[in-house]
Amino acid sequence: MDQQSKNDIALSIRDLSLSYQGNPSALKSISVDIPRHSVTAIIGASGCGKSSLLRCLNRMNDLIDGVQYSGEVLLEEMNVLSAETNVTALRRRVGMVFQRPNPFPKSVFDNVAYGLKLSGVKSQRHREELVEKALRSAALWDEVQYRLDESALQLSQGQQQRLVIARAIALEPDILLLDEPASSLDPISTLRLEELIYELKQTLTIIIVTHNMQQAARVSDFTAFMNQGHLVEFGPTDTIFTRPSMRETEDYITGRYG
């Protein structure tokens, strides 16, 4: 791979397999390069390994008893899966947002500032600047700028999800992982989230797991289709949805199964 193409790759996944108790082959020999400053959607039927793959990328699977990895996930020159990897530092670089909003029972401001404090930002003024920047980036500042001292739990679900995204991007990660982030949102909140994803990819690499193929088609530049722990096909979203090269992919896209 030449230097130019290396610079275009945010993550290189090489022969990645994953097993844990009760699921000896959750992921099977997956290899794919994730392009930088783009949105990659991971689609497939329930239980195909979408979330397991996503959680490998910032080691969230470590929380599962008996988990075992093989292969590599390369973030620049660092193998994410190495026993020597500082997982706390990794999760600053590879942030994650889950299906349901999970704000802390703290103020709006303290939710976003929490990670900044932990990462050593001591100046209150600097924290305030970074919190505002993150809230603006998450398209939430105009709605909460006069509510920063209120509990985050008083926000709507859509606002809470954008707050959680602000909390993640306050640390200026390289990559943002979204695990079905709109599954609990109403259509208007979902639209705002999708608009936000489009804005964020200008400065971030985004990988989104979604069960909604229409959403994948709307928000992503690239799509990975998975089935039973295998990566069946990966390519530009337009190609995957209109001219897939694998029959399995075509059958899933057209609704013949899944």
Image (cartoon, rainbow, N blue to C red):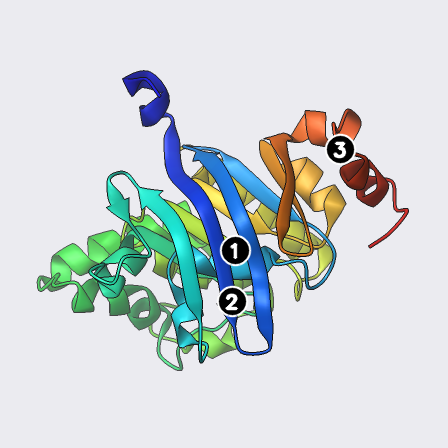
- The amino acid at mark 1 is Leu
**What residue is pinned by disc 3?**
246
Does residue 174 appear anywhere in the picture? no
Residue under the point 65% across and 53% down: 210
- The amino acid at mark 2 is Ser
- 20, 218: nearer the viewer: 20
Residue 87, percent from left and from top: 26, 63
- 138, 183: nearer the viewer: 183
Residue 223, percent from left and from top: 62, 37
Residue 200 appears in which quarter of the rendering? top left
Q: Is residue 129 above or below residue 151?
A: above
Q: Quick check: 21 left or right of 227?
A: left
Nearest to the eye among marks 1 and 3: give it. Answer: 3
Q: Earlier in the sequence, mark 2 or mark 1?
A: 2
Residue 96, percent from left and from top: 43, 59
How many labels, in total? 3
Residue closest to the far right: 256
- 42, 181: nearer the viewer: 42
Does residue 248 appear anywhere in the picture? yes
Q: CA distance from mark 1 to mark 3?
A: 21 Å
- The amino acid at mark 3 is Met
**Callout 3: helix, strand or loop?**
loop
Q: Earlier in the sequence, mark 2 or mark 3?
A: 2
**What residue is pinned by disc 2?**
19
**What residue is pinned by disc 1?**
53
Q: Badge 2, how many Cα within 10 Å: few under 14, some, many 20+?
A: some
Q: Badge 1, how many Cα within 10 Å: few under 14, some, many 20+?
A: many
Q: Badge 3, how many Cα within 10 Å: few under 14, some, many 20+?
A: few
Residue under the point 81% across and 35% down: 247
